[in-house]
Image (spheres, coloured by chain):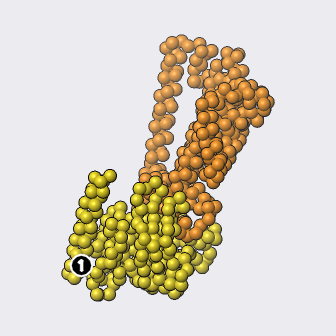
């Protein structure tokens, strides 16, 4: 019994790493092929149906717009990216903060949870003109718009994760005389991270929508503003170029966040799977 | 460490909104430094009793009676708890899991805590696994880490709620012997539904039947007892007693239901 025991999954994990590497290459390969096929189809539609550039510009024209005036695109992209990142940070801060307060203070939960759920009946897009009125046409209204749009998913996923800590862990902590703050910091929060990570992934995809909607309603810069201006001047290729950058931002933000969350052992696939299993067993 | 005797007097527990108490007016003495096993079928209330001893019953439920040591003092701070699931935190490495109490009380384990954890892990044959995450361990290894975490708490009383029940027969047998050796000198209450486990490890065995405790006969040989013909005889008798109690309980429940 006392002889040293070899860990059971060393070889398996190495094999998994290799598989992950191959898997990533395969995904990249498939993504490239699919993109090329779609671009080919796009070009074919333009040629077959003789589409004028103000209805559907060919892919090469959009590419030309992307490289012909990079400064203009970069300036507007930077504004939108800043709004998205600030909105994400503000939304995460507000969402996690409210989830923690609802967990720690029962009256806050009793009074605010129904309001929070009911608030989802209000379409956030409809708030955009009011936000312009209150916070002006600058960056603040767009940041708040992006923050508001992610506030609900972040709050609910974080609260859900905090509330469903396996009771066995909390029992153990109680027998070890841990106070509620230590239980929160060392047990509840790490156990909630996989669920919160799902909320953050959703938030990263949704936040750009909030920022662009804000720009559409009223702004003096940003990719949404650029799209509106291009649309008014029938410069549809410029619109497509802005749209392409926006899609690129969303994809890059999603994958970088996903990688960041995965690289953290607390929310790794294995830990998440294990926690889910524990929650099923112990709740 | 001085061994602690546990005296349970007039202990009752009724869950909120439950029509009947789980148990009432229970009296039991757990001798200091010895293993007492509590045997009963599923749902008889043995885990509730253990949770009551560990102070895990929420205040909205109705509890009465007292649980004191030989000096008449409450047992607070003297109890370590080992559950059926290993309860290892998946985000902490093995040695950090072993040092969990230090983390929860001081925020961060000290170098001394880690040194002691390493010593305990080596004692339990897990020296090479201290830097692994629990995911990398087998079921038996995980329970040994849980045992190391319990030992790390260094309390005179250990409450165990079927900690070996999820393991295969061979691992369970090995771990029983290992736990018995490691917990020497402590007062242990082991909850189990396995008569063989109770007879093998228990210096005292109690049957929890119809919300009452009844002492069971045990072989005279020293614990941990070998699984031999004598133990087999006692096991048959225990099983018969458990079955008879279950049948009586079912009949009593049916007649009570008919009366209502």
Q: Chain B: what color?
A: yellow
- Disc 1 crowd, CA 10 A, few/some/many (<14, 14-19, 20+): some
Name which quarter of the figure residue A26 lies in: top left
**From what the image shows, is residue B92 above or below residue A119?**
below
Name the residue: 50% across, 35% down.
Answer: A32
The quarter holding residue B59 reads bottom right
Point 63% across, 38% down: residue: A115
Residue B256 position (above or below residue A50): below
In the picture, the quarter occupied by the N terminus of chain A is bottom left
Viewer can see residue B226: yes
How far across and down, in percent of the image, does residue A5 sit?
40, 73
Identified at 59% across, 24% down, the residue is: A60
Question: Which secondary structure, mark 1?
Answer: helix
Kindly tell me whether residue A154 is visible in this rendering.
Answer: no
Q: Residue at x 49, y 36 (%)?
A: A31
Residue A83 in picture, x, y percent from top left: 71, 37
Q: Chain of mark 1?
A: B
The residue tagged 1 is B234
Say which chain is orange.
Answer: A
- Give the side of residue A46 with respect to residue B160, left or right: right
- Vertical relation: A37 (above or below) A258: above
Task: Decide which of A74, A277 is in the foreground and name it.
Answer: A277
């Amino acid at each position: 019994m006392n002889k040293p025991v070899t860990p059971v999954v060393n070889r398996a994990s190495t094999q998994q790493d290799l598989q992950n590497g191959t898997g990533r290459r395969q995904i990249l390969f498939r993504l490239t092929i699919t993109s090329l096929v779609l671009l080919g189809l796009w070009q074919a539609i333009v040629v077959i149906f003789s589409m004028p550039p103000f209805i559907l510009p060919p892919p090469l024209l959009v590419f030309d717009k992307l490289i012909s005036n990079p400064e203009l695109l970069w300036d507007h992209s930077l504004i939108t990216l800043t709004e998205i990142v600030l909105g994400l940070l503000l939304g995460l801060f507000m969402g996690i903060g409210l989830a923690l307060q609802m967990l720690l203070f029962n009256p806050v939960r009793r009074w605010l949870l129904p309001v929070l759920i009911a608030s989802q009946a209000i379409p956030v897009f409809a708030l955009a003109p009011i936000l312009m009125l209150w916070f002006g046409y600058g960056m603040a209204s767009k940041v708040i718009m992006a923050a508001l749009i992610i506030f609900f998913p972040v709050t609910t996923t974080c609260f859900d994760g905090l509330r469903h800590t396996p009771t066995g862990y909390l029992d153990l902590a109680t027998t070890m005389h841990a106070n509620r703050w230590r239980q929160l910091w060392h047990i509840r929060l790490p156990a909630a991270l996989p669920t919160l990570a799902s909320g953050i992934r959703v938030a990263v995809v949704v936040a750009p929508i909030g920022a662009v909607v804000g720009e559409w309603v009223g702004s003096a810069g940003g990719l949404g503003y650029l799209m509106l201006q291009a649309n008014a001047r029938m410069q549809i290729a410029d619109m497509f170029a802005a749209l392409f950058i926006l899609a690129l931002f969303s994809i890059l933000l999603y994958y970088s966040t996903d990688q960041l969350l995965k690289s953290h052992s607390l929310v790794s696939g294995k830990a998440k799977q294990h926690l889910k299993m524990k929650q099923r067993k112990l709740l | 460490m001085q061994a602690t005797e546990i005296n349970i007097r007039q202990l009752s527990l009724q869950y909120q909104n439950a029509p009947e108490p789980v148990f009432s007016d229970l009296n039991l003495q757990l001798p200091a430094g010895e293993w007492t096993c509590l045997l009963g079928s599923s749902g008889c209330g043995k885990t509730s009793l253990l949770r009551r001893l560990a102070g895990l019953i929420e205040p909205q439920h109705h509890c009465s009676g007292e649980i004191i040591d030989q000096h008449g003092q409450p047992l607070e701070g003297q109890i370590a708890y080992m559950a059926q699931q290993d309860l290892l935190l998946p985000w902490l490495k093995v040695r950090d899991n072993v040092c969990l109490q230090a983390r929860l009380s001081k925020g961060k384990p000290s170098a001394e805590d880690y040194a002691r954890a390493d010593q305990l892990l080596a004692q339990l044959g897990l020296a090479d696994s201290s830097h692994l995450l629990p995911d990398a361990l087998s079921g038996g290894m995980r329970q040994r880490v849980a045992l190391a975490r319990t030992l790390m708490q260094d309390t005179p009383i250990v409450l165990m709620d079927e900690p070996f029940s999820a393991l295969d027969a061979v691992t369970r047998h090995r771990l029983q012997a290992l736990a018995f050796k490691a917990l020497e000198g402590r007062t242990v209450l082991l909850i189990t539904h396995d008569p063989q486990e109770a007879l093998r490890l228990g210096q005292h065995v109690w049957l929890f039947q119809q919300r009452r405790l009844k002492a069971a006969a045990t072989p005279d040989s020293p614990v941990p007892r070998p699984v031999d013909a004598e133990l087999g005889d006692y096991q048959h008798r225990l099983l018969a007693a458990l079955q008879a109690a279950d049948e009586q309980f079912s009949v009593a429940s049916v007649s009570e239901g008919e009366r209502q």
